[in-house]
Each structure stands twice: as structure tokens, then as C-alpha cells.
Image (cartoon, rainbow, N blue to C red):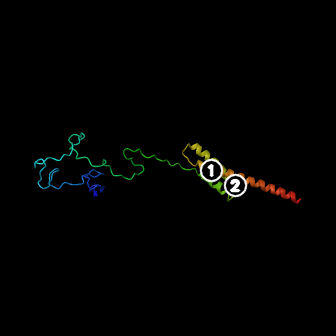
Amino acid sequence: MEFCSECGQGNRDDSAFCIQCGTPLKQQPPGEQPGTTPESGQTPESAGQAPQPQGEPMPQPPGPQGAEPAGPPPAGPPPQAPMQPFTPGAQAPPGYAPPPMMRVVPTDGLAIASLVLSISSFIFCPFFAAILGLVFGYISLNHIAEQKGALGGEPLARAGIIIGWVHLGLVILAGILLLILVVVGVVKTS
């Protein structure tokens, strides 16, 4: 494997040009012209030998005025620019659309408070924390609706409201069961 002196790309041993950047890999020794034999410095035609058939030369595309003709095409894919890491906010590489810019929407603090109070109502202050969770949840939904997308946290507020109602339903159900047990106990003792 032969490595390019310009970009460091590994190439096959029989490659004449780098597959990454197109740089010639095998340099001609100084004083030797392409197509000459190293011993005599003569071309095969001037030495009386028949030239080696190498096919017809490839037509070159027209270049800018005054430009020198380019060398033979590289043996491999066209050269590519080295990849640079993409940084957000930078210009997108050619041929690619810029990445979508994600807008960070702030979350309403009351939505977070609603969810936290509703969850904590199962452990601390069962009745009052659930009611505060419901109140904060409904206030938060109103704030979010008024802001029309500039304020987030709707799923948190809805979860706080649902958990608050579930907890209040369980507290009311437990209160009814406790009242039934007390009434049944009073009736049996009398």
C-alpha cells in the first residue's frame, strides 16, 4: 500500500494517482520525461521501436481561457474535500440542507408544580396537595393556551390534573368506605 504525500490516504500499489485528492503518487525522477526509457532518455519512436499502443487519448473538457491542460484523470473516484466536523449555526456543506434549528420552549413552572404536588399527595397531605395540584394544573393550561406555543409544559399540567383527580377520587372513596364502616360499627354496638 502506497500512501499519498499530500493527504495521507492509503492507495493500491499500482495506482498512479491518490484516490482521495488526485495527487500523482509516483513521481518521475528528475531529468526524465514521461514516456522515455530511463537508460537512454529516448522515446520508443526515436529509438526505432514501435510505440506501445495505449488507446486513444481521452478528450479534455474545455477549460478556462489561458489554463494549462490538466493531467490524466485520477484512477478512482473524484477527489473530495476533507470532512470537517459540523458545528451548529455554521453554514451547511454544499449539497446538503442546513439542519433544522430546534427552538427551545420554556416550561411553565406551574405545570411542574402541578405534577409534583399531585404525585406528592399520595405521600404528604393527601387531600390538600391534590387540590393544589389541580388548581396549578388548570392555571398552567390557561397560561400555555394564552402564549400560543411560546410556553411549554402542557403534558406536565395534564398529568398533574389527571393524577390529582385520581387521588381525590381515591380519598373520597376511602372516606365513604370509612363512613360505612363507622355506621356499621355503631349499629352493631347498639
Which residue is at the far right?
190
- Position of residue 53 measured from the top left corner of the image (x, y, whole percent): 19, 46
Q: Nearer the viewer, residue 34 or 160?
A: 34
Per the image, label 1 sits on a secondary structure element best described as helix
- Can you say which quadrant of the picture contains the C terminus? bottom right
Q: Residues within 10 Å of mark 1 (few under 14, many from 20)?
A: many
Disc 2 residue crowd, few under 14, some 14–19, many 20+, Cα 10 Å: some
For the point 82% across and 57% down, which residue is it?
A: 182
Q: Dots 1 and 2: beta carbons under 8 Å?
A: no
Q: Position of residue 16 (x, y in %)?
A: 24, 52
Left or right, 58 with reference to 49: right
Q: Which mark is residue 159?
A: 1
Give left or right: position of 148 versus 117. Answer: left
Residue 95: x %, y % from top left: 37, 44
Q: Quadrant of the N terminus?
A: bottom left
Q: Nearer the viewer, residue 146 or 189?
A: 189
Q: Residue at x 61, y 49 (%)?
A: 157
- Between the residue at mark 1 and the residue at mark 2, the CA separation in whole angstroms equals 17 Å
Q: In the image, is 175 to the left or to the right of 58?
A: right
Rendered location of residue 135, percent (x, y): 66, 49
Of tags 1 and 2, the one toward the viewer is 1
**Is residue 127 or residue 173 the one in the foreground?**
173
Q: Which residue is mark 2?
A: 128
Considering only order in the chain, which callout, 2 or 1, is on the residue closer to the N terminus? 2
* Residue type of the residue flagged with mark 1: Ala
Q: Is residue 172 above or below residue 64?
A: below
Q: Amino acid at mark 2?
A: Phe
